[in-house]
Amino acid sequence: MRILVTGASGFIGGRFARFALEQGLSVRINGRQADAAAGLIARGAEFIQGDLADPELARRACAGVEAVVHCAGAVGVWGPYERFYQGNVQLTDNVLAACQTEGVRRLVHLSSPSIYFDGQSHVGIREEQLPQRFSDHYGATKYLAEQHVFAAQQHGLEVLALRPRFVTGAGDTSIFPRLIRMQRKGRLSIIGDGQNRVDFTSIHNLNDALFSALLACGEALGKAYNISNGAPMPLWQVVNHVLARFDLPPVTRHVPYPLAYGLATLSEWTCRLLPGQPEPSLFRMGVNVMARDFSLDISRARQYLGYQPKAEVWDAVDEFCDWWRIREGA
Protein backbone atom coordinates (compact mmCIF):
# COMPACT_ATOMS: atom_id res chain seq x y z
CA MET A 1 0.00 0.00 0.00
CA ARG A 2 1.23 3.48 -0.87
CA ILE A 3 0.22 6.14 1.65
CA LEU A 4 0.69 9.84 2.34
CA VAL A 5 1.29 10.98 5.92
CA THR A 6 0.69 14.69 6.47
CA GLY A 7 2.20 16.47 9.44
CA ALA A 8 5.13 14.03 9.37
CA SER A 9 7.48 16.63 10.85
CA GLY A 10 5.42 16.49 14.06
CA PHE A 11 5.44 13.88 16.82
CA ILE A 12 2.46 11.70 15.88
CA GLY A 13 2.79 12.00 12.11
CA GLY A 14 6.51 11.37 12.22
CA ARG A 15 6.25 8.33 14.48
CA PHE A 16 3.48 6.81 12.38
CA ALA A 17 5.38 7.38 9.13
CA ARG A 18 8.33 5.55 10.64
CA PHE A 19 6.06 2.73 11.85
CA ALA A 20 4.42 2.42 8.43
CA LEU A 21 7.83 2.10 6.77
CA GLU A 22 8.70 -0.65 9.24
CA GLN A 23 5.50 -2.47 8.23
CA GLY A 24 6.60 -2.46 4.60
CA LEU A 25 4.31 0.30 3.32
CA SER A 26 5.43 2.74 0.66
CA VAL A 27 5.32 6.09 2.46
CA ARG A 28 5.19 9.64 1.16
CA ILE A 29 5.44 12.41 3.73
CA ASN A 30 4.67 16.10 3.64
CA GLY A 31 6.22 18.92 5.63
CA ARG A 32 7.50 22.46 5.36
CA GLN A 33 11.12 21.79 6.33
CA ALA A 34 13.27 19.08 4.80
CA ASP A 35 15.62 18.91 7.79
CA ALA A 36 12.73 17.87 10.06
CA ALA A 37 12.04 14.93 7.74
CA ALA A 38 15.66 13.90 7.21
CA GLY A 39 15.41 10.78 9.37
CA LEU A 40 12.34 9.53 7.54
CA ILE A 41 13.85 10.30 4.14
CA ALA A 42 16.92 8.27 5.14
CA ARG A 43 14.59 5.36 6.00
CA GLY A 44 13.06 5.45 2.52
CA ALA A 45 10.16 7.91 2.71
CA GLU A 46 9.41 10.13 -0.27
CA PHE A 47 9.30 13.77 0.76
CA ILE A 48 6.99 16.41 -0.70
CA GLN A 49 7.97 19.77 0.70
CA GLY A 50 5.44 22.56 1.08
CA ASP A 51 2.37 23.90 2.82
CA LEU A 52 -0.92 22.03 2.35
CA ALA A 53 -2.68 25.39 2.52
CA ASP A 54 -1.70 25.46 -1.17
CA PRO A 55 -4.38 23.38 -2.98
CA GLU A 56 -2.02 22.53 -5.83
CA LEU A 57 0.61 21.24 -3.39
CA ALA A 58 -2.06 19.15 -1.66
CA ARG A 59 -3.10 17.67 -5.01
CA ARG A 60 0.50 16.80 -5.87
CA ALA A 61 1.04 15.22 -2.47
CA CYS A 62 -2.04 13.00 -2.92
CA ALA A 63 -1.24 11.94 -6.47
CA GLY A 64 -0.72 8.21 -6.79
CA VAL A 65 -1.42 7.21 -3.18
CA GLU A 66 -4.09 4.79 -2.02
CA ALA A 67 -4.63 6.29 1.43
CA VAL A 68 -3.87 9.43 3.43
CA VAL A 69 -3.17 9.58 7.15
CA HIS A 70 -3.90 13.22 7.89
CA CYS A 71 -2.00 14.39 10.98
CA ALA A 72 -1.30 18.00 10.00
CA GLY A 73 -3.10 20.85 11.71
CA ALA A 74 -2.97 23.84 14.03
CA VAL A 75 -2.53 23.10 17.73
CA GLY A 76 -2.57 25.15 20.91
CA VAL A 77 -5.04 27.05 23.08
CA TRP A 78 -4.21 30.66 22.23
CA GLY A 79 -4.69 32.71 19.12
CA PRO A 80 -7.43 34.00 16.84
CA TYR A 81 -10.13 31.71 15.51
CA GLU A 82 -8.94 32.35 11.95
CA ARG A 83 -5.57 30.67 12.64
CA PHE A 84 -7.21 27.50 13.90
CA TYR A 85 -9.83 27.54 11.15
CA GLN A 86 -7.18 27.85 8.46
CA GLY A 87 -4.91 25.23 10.03
CA ASN A 88 -7.57 22.65 10.84
CA VAL A 89 -10.54 23.19 8.54
CA GLN A 90 -9.30 24.83 5.36
CA LEU A 91 -6.17 22.70 5.25
CA THR A 92 -8.29 19.56 5.70
CA ASP A 93 -10.63 20.76 2.95
CA ASN A 94 -7.64 21.06 0.62
CA VAL A 95 -6.59 17.49 1.42
CA LEU A 96 -10.15 16.22 0.91
CA ALA A 97 -10.43 17.97 -2.44
CA ALA A 98 -7.06 16.54 -3.49
CA CYS A 99 -8.19 13.03 -2.46
CA GLN A 100 -11.26 13.37 -4.64
CA THR A 101 -9.32 14.74 -7.62
CA GLU A 102 -6.58 12.11 -7.41
CA GLY A 103 -8.82 9.13 -6.69
CA VAL A 104 -7.50 8.39 -3.20
CA ARG A 105 -9.49 5.53 -1.67
CA ARG A 106 -9.24 6.28 2.06
CA LEU A 107 -8.48 9.07 4.52
CA VAL A 108 -7.68 8.44 8.19
CA HIS A 109 -8.11 11.71 10.04
CA LEU A 110 -6.28 12.48 13.29
CA SER A 111 -8.79 14.36 15.42
CA SER A 112 -8.72 15.15 19.14
CA PRO A 113 -10.70 14.43 22.33
CA SER A 114 -10.36 18.15 23.03
CA ILE A 115 -13.70 18.42 21.27
CA TYR A 116 -15.32 16.89 24.39
CA PHE A 117 -13.73 19.25 26.86
CA ASP A 118 -16.10 21.65 28.61
CA GLY A 119 -14.16 22.25 31.80
CA GLN A 120 -15.93 19.46 33.69
CA SER A 121 -14.80 16.01 34.76
CA HIS A 122 -15.67 13.16 32.41
CA VAL A 123 -15.11 9.46 33.01
CA GLY A 124 -15.52 6.98 30.16
CA ILE A 125 -16.85 9.56 27.72
CA ARG A 126 -18.24 8.10 24.49
CA GLU A 127 -17.78 9.38 20.95
CA GLU A 128 -21.30 10.81 20.70
CA GLN A 129 -21.15 12.75 23.99
CA LEU A 130 -20.37 16.20 22.61
CA PRO A 131 -20.66 19.39 24.65
CA GLN A 132 -23.29 22.02 23.89
CA ARG A 133 -20.49 24.47 23.15
CA PHE A 134 -16.76 24.08 22.60
CA SER A 135 -14.33 25.49 25.16
CA ASP A 136 -11.78 26.82 22.70
CA HIS A 137 -11.02 27.43 19.04
CA TYR A 138 -8.92 24.29 18.79
CA GLY A 139 -11.72 21.96 19.86
CA ALA A 140 -14.29 23.78 17.74
CA THR A 141 -12.22 23.63 14.55
CA LYS A 142 -11.09 20.04 15.07
CA TYR A 143 -14.72 18.98 15.31
CA LEU A 144 -15.67 21.05 12.25
CA ALA A 145 -12.83 19.45 10.30
CA GLU A 146 -14.14 16.04 11.36
CA GLN A 147 -17.58 16.89 10.00
CA HIS A 148 -16.07 17.89 6.66
CA VAL A 149 -14.19 14.58 6.59
CA PHE A 150 -17.35 12.56 7.18
CA ALA A 151 -19.24 14.62 4.58
CA ALA A 152 -16.65 13.53 2.00
CA GLN A 153 -18.11 10.02 2.11
CA GLN A 154 -20.81 11.15 -0.29
CA HIS A 155 -18.06 11.53 -2.91
CA GLY A 156 -16.92 7.93 -2.41
CA LEU A 157 -14.00 8.52 -0.02
CA GLU A 158 -13.64 5.98 2.80
CA VAL A 159 -13.02 7.86 6.05
CA LEU A 160 -12.29 7.23 9.72
CA ALA A 161 -11.34 9.66 12.50
CA LEU A 162 -9.27 8.88 15.59
CA ARG A 163 -9.33 10.90 18.82
CA PRO A 164 -6.24 9.93 20.87
CA ARG A 165 -5.79 11.26 24.40
CA PHE A 166 -2.47 12.53 25.86
CA VAL A 167 -0.15 10.70 23.46
CA THR A 168 3.36 10.24 24.78
CA GLY A 169 6.63 8.55 23.93
CA ALA A 170 9.89 9.58 22.29
CA GLY A 171 9.24 12.74 20.26
CA ASP A 172 6.49 14.16 22.50
CA THR A 173 7.07 17.89 22.93
CA SER A 174 3.62 18.92 24.13
CA ILE A 175 2.78 17.22 27.43
CA PHE A 176 5.75 16.94 29.78
CA PRO A 177 8.39 19.44 28.54
CA ARG A 178 6.31 22.44 29.65
CA LEU A 179 5.78 20.92 33.10
CA ILE A 180 9.49 20.18 33.46
CA ARG A 181 10.34 23.79 32.63
CA MET A 182 7.75 25.11 35.08
CA GLN A 183 9.05 22.95 37.93
CA ARG A 184 12.62 24.07 37.25
CA LYS A 185 11.38 27.64 37.72
CA GLY A 186 9.46 26.70 40.87
CA ARG A 187 6.14 27.59 39.26
CA LEU A 188 4.39 24.21 39.13
CA SER A 189 1.58 23.50 41.59
CA ILE A 190 -1.04 20.81 42.02
CA ILE A 191 -4.44 22.27 41.21
CA GLY A 192 -7.16 21.04 43.53
CA ASP A 193 -6.72 17.86 45.56
CA GLY A 194 -4.40 16.17 43.03
CA GLN A 195 -6.45 12.98 42.90
CA ASN A 196 -7.73 13.40 39.34
CA ARG A 197 -7.25 10.47 36.98
CA VAL A 198 -6.74 10.87 33.24
CA ASP A 199 -6.13 8.78 30.14
CA PHE A 200 -2.79 8.58 28.38
CA THR A 201 -1.97 6.85 25.09
CA SER A 202 1.33 5.19 24.26
CA ILE A 203 2.50 6.26 20.82
CA HIS A 204 2.97 2.56 20.04
CA ASN A 205 -0.72 1.88 20.69
CA LEU A 206 -1.75 4.84 18.56
CA ASN A 207 0.44 3.55 15.74
CA ASP A 208 -1.39 0.22 15.96
CA ALA A 209 -4.76 2.01 15.86
CA LEU A 210 -3.80 4.12 12.84
CA PHE A 211 -2.53 1.05 11.01
CA SER A 212 -5.76 -0.81 11.81
CA ALA A 213 -7.71 2.16 10.45
CA LEU A 214 -5.85 1.83 7.15
CA LEU A 215 -6.93 -1.80 6.87
CA ALA A 216 -10.45 -1.61 8.34
CA CYS A 217 -13.49 -2.33 6.22
CA GLY A 218 -17.26 -2.67 6.35
CA GLU A 219 -18.96 -1.28 9.44
CA ALA A 220 -15.71 0.16 10.75
CA LEU A 221 -15.75 2.90 8.12
CA GLY A 222 -17.35 6.29 8.62
CA LYS A 223 -16.88 6.40 12.39
CA ALA A 224 -14.93 8.40 14.97
CA TYR A 225 -12.91 6.44 17.51
CA ASN A 226 -11.64 7.26 20.98
CA ILE A 227 -8.10 5.99 21.47
CA SER A 228 -6.27 5.67 24.79
CA ASN A 229 -4.58 3.04 26.92
CA GLY A 230 -7.95 2.35 28.50
CA ALA A 231 -6.70 2.66 32.09
CA PRO A 232 -6.96 6.15 33.66
CA MET A 233 -3.95 7.06 35.80
CA PRO A 234 -3.40 9.60 38.62
CA LEU A 235 -2.13 12.59 36.67
CA TRP A 236 0.11 14.02 39.37
CA GLN A 237 1.67 10.63 40.11
CA VAL A 238 2.73 10.44 36.46
CA VAL A 239 4.00 14.04 36.53
CA ASN A 240 6.08 13.39 39.66
CA HIS A 241 7.50 10.23 38.09
CA VAL A 242 8.72 12.30 35.15
CA LEU A 243 10.16 14.98 37.43
CA ALA A 244 12.05 12.34 39.42
CA ARG A 245 13.62 11.08 36.18
CA PHE A 246 15.12 14.55 35.76
CA ASP A 247 16.26 14.81 39.39
CA LEU A 248 13.63 17.42 40.15
CA PRO A 249 11.66 17.54 43.41
CA PRO A 250 8.07 16.29 43.33
CA VAL A 251 5.19 18.73 43.15
CA THR A 252 3.68 18.99 46.63
CA ARG A 253 2.26 22.50 46.73
CA HIS A 254 -1.50 22.71 46.21
CA VAL A 255 -3.48 25.64 44.82
CA PRO A 256 -7.26 25.64 45.29
CA TYR A 257 -9.09 25.23 42.00
CA PRO A 258 -11.15 28.47 42.30
CA LEU A 259 -7.98 30.48 42.90
CA ALA A 260 -6.12 28.89 39.98
CA TYR A 261 -9.08 29.39 37.65
CA GLY A 262 -9.44 33.03 38.72
CA LEU A 263 -5.74 33.71 38.14
CA ALA A 264 -5.96 32.08 34.71
CA THR A 265 -8.97 34.22 33.79
CA LEU A 266 -7.10 37.36 34.86
CA SER A 267 -4.01 36.29 32.92
CA GLU A 268 -5.99 35.70 29.73
CA TRP A 269 -7.88 38.99 29.88
CA THR A 270 -4.69 40.91 30.65
CA CYS A 271 -2.95 39.43 27.62
CA ARG A 272 -5.92 40.26 25.40
CA LEU A 273 -5.52 43.92 26.35
CA LEU A 274 -1.77 44.03 25.76
CA PRO A 275 -0.30 44.95 22.35
CA GLY A 276 0.05 41.86 20.20
CA GLN A 277 -2.02 39.80 22.65
CA PRO A 278 0.93 37.71 23.95
CA GLU A 279 0.27 34.15 25.10
CA PRO A 280 -0.60 33.95 28.82
CA SER A 281 1.48 31.90 31.22
CA LEU A 282 -1.72 30.39 32.66
CA PHE A 283 -4.86 29.29 30.80
CA ARG A 284 -8.32 28.37 32.04
CA MET A 285 -8.20 25.36 29.75
CA GLY A 286 -4.87 24.31 31.24
CA VAL A 287 -6.22 24.66 34.78
CA ASN A 288 -9.15 22.41 33.92
CA VAL A 289 -6.98 19.85 32.14
CA MET A 290 -4.68 19.58 35.17
CA ALA A 291 -7.49 19.46 37.75
CA ARG A 292 -10.26 17.31 36.24
CA ASP A 293 -10.83 13.60 35.73
CA PHE A 294 -10.87 12.83 32.02
CA SER A 295 -11.03 9.40 30.42
CA LEU A 296 -12.41 7.85 27.25
CA ASP A 297 -14.59 4.86 26.48
CA ILE A 298 -12.58 2.92 23.87
CA SER A 299 -15.08 0.08 23.38
CA ARG A 300 -15.93 1.22 19.83
CA ALA A 301 -12.28 0.99 18.78
CA ARG A 302 -12.03 -2.43 20.41
CA GLN A 303 -15.13 -3.62 18.56
CA TYR A 304 -14.59 -2.26 15.07
CA LEU A 305 -10.81 -1.80 14.80
CA GLY A 306 -9.75 -4.74 16.94
CA TYR A 307 -7.83 -2.21 19.03
CA GLN A 308 -6.02 -3.68 22.03
CA PRO A 309 -3.68 -1.30 23.90
CA LYS A 310 -0.66 -3.54 24.44
CA ALA A 311 2.08 -1.02 25.26
CA GLU A 312 2.14 0.25 28.85
CA VAL A 313 1.88 3.96 29.64
CA TRP A 314 4.81 3.79 32.05
CA ASP A 315 7.02 2.42 29.29
CA ALA A 316 5.94 5.25 26.98
CA VAL A 317 6.62 7.82 29.71
CA ASP A 318 10.10 6.41 30.32
CA GLU A 319 10.71 6.34 26.57
CA PHE A 320 9.89 10.05 26.51
CA CYS A 321 12.22 10.74 29.46
CA ASP A 322 15.15 8.92 27.84
CA TRP A 323 14.60 10.81 24.58
CA TRP A 324 14.15 14.22 26.23
CA ARG A 325 17.29 13.79 28.32
CA ILE A 326 19.30 13.14 25.16
CA ARG A 327 17.67 16.08 23.41
CA GLU A 328 18.41 18.43 26.31
CA GLY A 329 21.97 17.21 26.43
CA ALA A 330 22.38 17.92 22.75
Image (tube, rainbow, N blue to C red):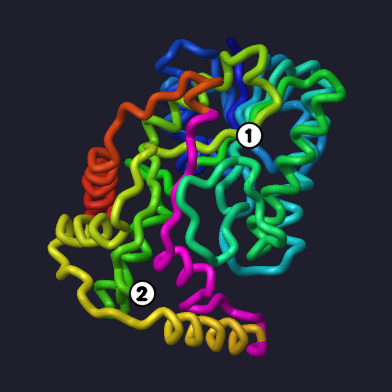
Task: Estimate the x, y position of residue 51 in percent, counting from the top left.
Answer: 69, 43
- The local secondary structure at tag 1 comes to strand
Query: Cβ–Cβ below 8 Å for labels 1 and 2?
Result: no
Front-most of residues 117 and 5: 117
- Per the rendered image, the range of residues in magenta is 273-300
Residue at the (65%, 19%) spot, across then down:
67
Task: Check the image and report above or below for 46 versus 326.
Answer: above
The answer to whether residue 41 is seen in the rendering is no
In the rendered image, residue 277 lying in the magenta stretch gets the answer yes
Identify the disc placed on residue 224. 1
Q: What is the three-letter code of the residue carrying label 1? A: Ala
Residue 263 seen: yes
Asked if residue 267 lies left or right of residue 233, the reply is right
Q: Is residue 203 magenta?
A: no
Question: Where residue 174 sits: x, y (%)?
Answer: 43, 55
Residue in view at x 76 percent, y 33 percent: 150
Q: Secondary structure at mark 2?
A: strand
Residue assigned mark 2: 191
Cα–Cα span, label 1 and label 2: 31 Å
Instruction: Name the residue: 78% across, 32% down.
Output: 96
* Left or right of residue 181: residue 218: right
Earlier-in-chain disc, 1 versus 2: 2
